[in-house]
Image (cartoon, grey):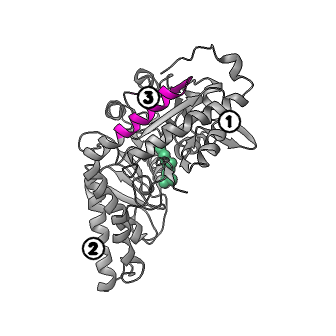
Amino acid sequence: MKVIYADNNATTQVAPEVLEEMVPYFHDLYGNPSSMHSFGGQVAGRLKEARERVARLIGATPDEILFTSCGTESDNTAIRAAIASHPEKKHIVTTRVEHPAVKNLCEHLGRHGYRVTFLPVDRHGRLDLEHLRKVLSSDTCIVSIMWANNETGVIFPIKEIAQMVRERGSVFHTDAVQAVGKIPIDMGQIPVDMLSLSGHKLHAPKGIGALYVRKGTKFSPFLIGGHQEGGRRGGTENVASIIGLGKACELVLEHLGDENERVKSLRDKLENGILKGIPSAMVNGDREHRLPNTTSISFEYVEGEAILLMMNEFGICASSGSACTSGSLEPSHVLRAMGVPFTAAHGSIRFSLSIYNKEEEIDFIIEKLPPIIERLRELSPFWGESKTATIVCS
Ligand SMILES: Cc1ncc(COP(=O)(O)O)c(C=O)c1O
């Protein structure tokens, strides 16, 4: 069966051009970049090039890029580096809608001597910047706020946030794992101190990430070991994946204009087709300030997991906004923080597209989804009673 892959915020296909550049580093060019001999030395040259390519994508300089194993490691490194470098400060600010890589670490730190402020969002997933201004103090060590939300695609105003945090003298980190490659990012224009990105969200392999650390930012390594990455992250480099990440960054930089516009028009077609064909469906999150590839749609009175299973029968891959925890289906913390009604949060599906999606795939989803929802609603004990209910659309 053909796979219709609409789950690119979960992970992406490795681009063929990326794979091609990586392959020689598994067999012919397997030297260690730290070796003194030229066999290893030639690999070091390719690492340098990869660092330059990553830096170019986000308007940084190569020495500000630190390779890590994933977005989660980048997030952990940034937050831990900030608190280790400013031991006198005990306050951390983040939001209620962060990825678990930030959310769970901050909760952990909250149990270990830190005071953590989790900023709320409104019904559209937006932050109140005045609220942020009020909670910042001389005790605030780090503010960690994502650039774009992985579930709804909502983009936060990172420039204003970064400026505000800088004025107050705290470190600003942004988890840009979902934003990099989808929207333009320029560290020359925005005073972010640290930024996380992850390879597998932008057509590089899984298991490679990077952390941007602005020159002059106080830093303390998370992985202590050898001298790799200028002593900022010990461990022999994941050479092939770093080279793959470099190539992927070069490719997405080329796609930031036209290709991402095409992805956006596919996303809009999908969203409009679904909203037109299915009653009581609503988009979650601020539709104006959103990633071009993402839509989160709630279908009242049905279970997201049931929708996913039925779409799976047709080869359609997407995600639900619920997480199955210890046997009970809990709606996602993001939708809960936005105040999405329980009946809608349970039936939410995230579609996330990439440059590899085709128009006929969108048509296929638009055709197959309405009968799936109709069938599930026929089985729902609540649907019949609710047919006349008014849904508040965002
Ligand atoms: C916003 C965000 N941050 C961090 C991560 C974690 O990245 P990784 O899977 O590379 O650890 C993800 C992955 O889904 C994400 O969406």
Q: Which residue is mark 3?
A: 136
- For label 2, count other residues whose C-alpha is less than 10 Å away and answer few (under 14), some (14-19) or many (20+): few
Which quadrant holds residue 268?
top left
Q: Which residue is mark 2?
A: 45
Identify which residue is drawn at 32% across, 85% down.
39
Which residue range is magenta in the image?
Answer: 264-287
Identify which residue is drawn at 44% across, 28% down.
136
Q: Which residue is mark 1?
A: 330
Identify which residue is drawn at 68% across, 36% down.
330
The disc labelled 3 sits on which kind of residue? Leu
Q: Give the label, 1 or 2, closer to the camera.
A: 1
Q: Give the label, 1 or 3, closer to the camera.
A: 1
In the displayed structure, would residue 164 be above or below residue 223?
above
Where does the image place residue 219, in percent across and percent down from the top left? 40, 53
Which quadrant holds residue 349?
top right
Element at badge 1?
Answer: strand
The mark that comes first in sequence, 1 or 2, is 2
The disc labelled 2 sits on which kind of residue? Gly
The mark that comes first in sequence, 2 or 3, is 2
Q: Is residue 181 left or right of residue 324?
A: left
Distance between the alpha carbons at the discs numbered 1 and 3: 32 Å
